[in-house]
Image: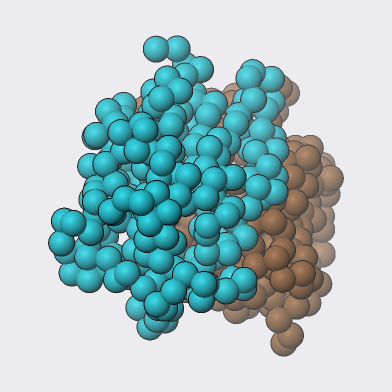
Chain colours: A brown, B cyan
Amino acid sequence: MSVSKRAVILLSGGLDSATCLAIARSQGFEAHTLAFRYGQRHQYELDRAQLISEKFAAASHRIVEIDLAQFGGSALTDAAIEVPKSDTVEAIGDSIPVTYVPARNTVFLSLALAFAETVEARDIFIGVNSLDYSGYPDCRPEFIKAYENMANLATKAGVEETRSLRIHTPLIDLTKAEIIARGMELGVDYGMTLSCYDPADGGVPCLHCDACLLRARGFATNGINDPALSNH
Amino acid sequence: MSVSKRAVILLSGGLDSATCLAIARSQGFEAHTLAFRYGQRHQYELDRAQLISEKFAAASHRIVEIDLAQFGGSALTDAAIEVPKSDTVEAIGDSIPVTYVPARNTVFLSLALAFAETVEARDIFIGVNSLDYSGYPDCRPEFIKAYENMANLATKAGVEETRSLRIHTPLIDLTKAEIIARGMELGVDYGMTLSCYDPADGGVPCLHCDACLLRARGFATNGINDPALSNH
């Protein structure tokens, strides 16, 4: 397979990044997946990322260790900060929630960039979404565009004027329901994915955090049951 | 001290970043220094970073662990790739050398950004230099400008329209000789600093890598002896 079809894909173990991997594979990319042990509240998502990576025959899968918890400031990395819970998706506010991890996507994309440069990949996929999301600044299209511009100046590729580096965000304009519909077409087994910010032992979703509420609405809109729930 | 005068400063233990810290302190910033254990060939520079940080009364000093060696691709993180050595500074070429670590400054700045966001600092200092340097793409002014633009979209600061985040590069237009002259005025003890890419046991500089050659020329131009050499 030619170098130009090699891509680095950020994988969290959640619904969005699994769909993103499926899309990259459907476009003929050789997939090199990266997951992060960054000090998140639970490690279940890392097991899911591994399974999803195998399911889509990724050429390689790595877990990168980077302790963002040492900086603090987020409910996702600090057990002392509670993950907000609600009964309805409408309760999700417009402001940046406490589950925001400072500069997380910037850090993850930077490590993906370092990895991409060493494997000579010019394509990075990230499953960010600017519609049904939690209001994080680093999921917005203008952030991704600015990141791509910076990345092309940061690396050898930019200096040597080879084909420029591209950050692919195939989900950015899709609703959660549309993401799920697209993934179903591509054979994603959503039973493997875990979206919950605060699962119980064994990775059982709480059903009340923002991520669970958005996911539930996405499946409901498609008129199908979430296969991850029938597992429990 | 007000939040607005708090800065995150990247510190490598080398000459440039020590000068950068001295400049930040001279401008009245409360200094929070970050060094990285990233899989570099030697750890001496981390000891130096700690000493320099104490000398300039940094408010905090952290060493962040991030294994860039796992990605490979650089003489600075792979013992199997030799650091180029020469007798004259003129031998430093125009192309990107094997000591380039893929996306290193992007990764370091991203972690600085995460840290800055949690301590509510809006200022990040990095000692990059676009004149007497080794030809790394991520030391160029256009890279820094693009990074700053991205950083302002990546974080809460960008969304909440508080004062924007600034990447300070006080050395970017200075020759190595000018950097040294500025540092001497500000009381930098260059005997504490280590620039060498490939020091012998105990942190003794090799005197023949690009970093040693550029440093030697900087001291020679100022007509002074390098205090780091009289230590050995």
User: Whole-percent x and y of residue A29?
Assistant: 74, 75
Q: Is residue B86 visible from the viewing direction of this image?
A: yes
**Which residue occupies the extreme top position in the image?**
B2
Given residues A4 and B122, the one toward you in this image is: B122
In the image, is A140 to the left or to the right of A36? right
Q: Identify the residue at horizontal 44%, vertical 74% (top origin).
A: B88
Q: Identify the residue at horizontal 51%, vertical 34% (top origin).
A: B124
User: Whole-percent x and y of residue A33?
Assistant: 59, 67
Q: Identify the residue at horizontal 32%, vertical 69% (top origin).
A: B207
Name the image quarter holding residue A209: top right
Name the image quarter holding residue B33: top left
Given residues A66 and B76, the one toward you in this image is: B76
Give the number of marks: 0
Given residues A140 and A178, the one toward you in this image is: A140
User: Whole-percent x and y of residue B136?
Assistant: 57, 62
Q: Identify the residue at horizontal 36%, vertical 31% (top origin).
A: B186
In the image, is B109 to the left or to the right of B29? right
User: Whole-percent x and y of residue A85?
Assistant: 55, 26
In the image, is B94 to the left or to the right of B125? right
Given residues A185 and B123, the one toward you in this image is: B123
- Image quarter in which the N terminus of chain B is found: top left
Q: Is residue A220 visible from the viewing direction of this image?
A: no
- Image quarter in which the C terminus of chain B is found: bottom left
Q: With respect to residue B47, does B6 lie above or below? A: above
**Which residue occupies the extreme front position in the image?**
B223
Q: With respect to residue A20, does A177 lie above or below? A: above
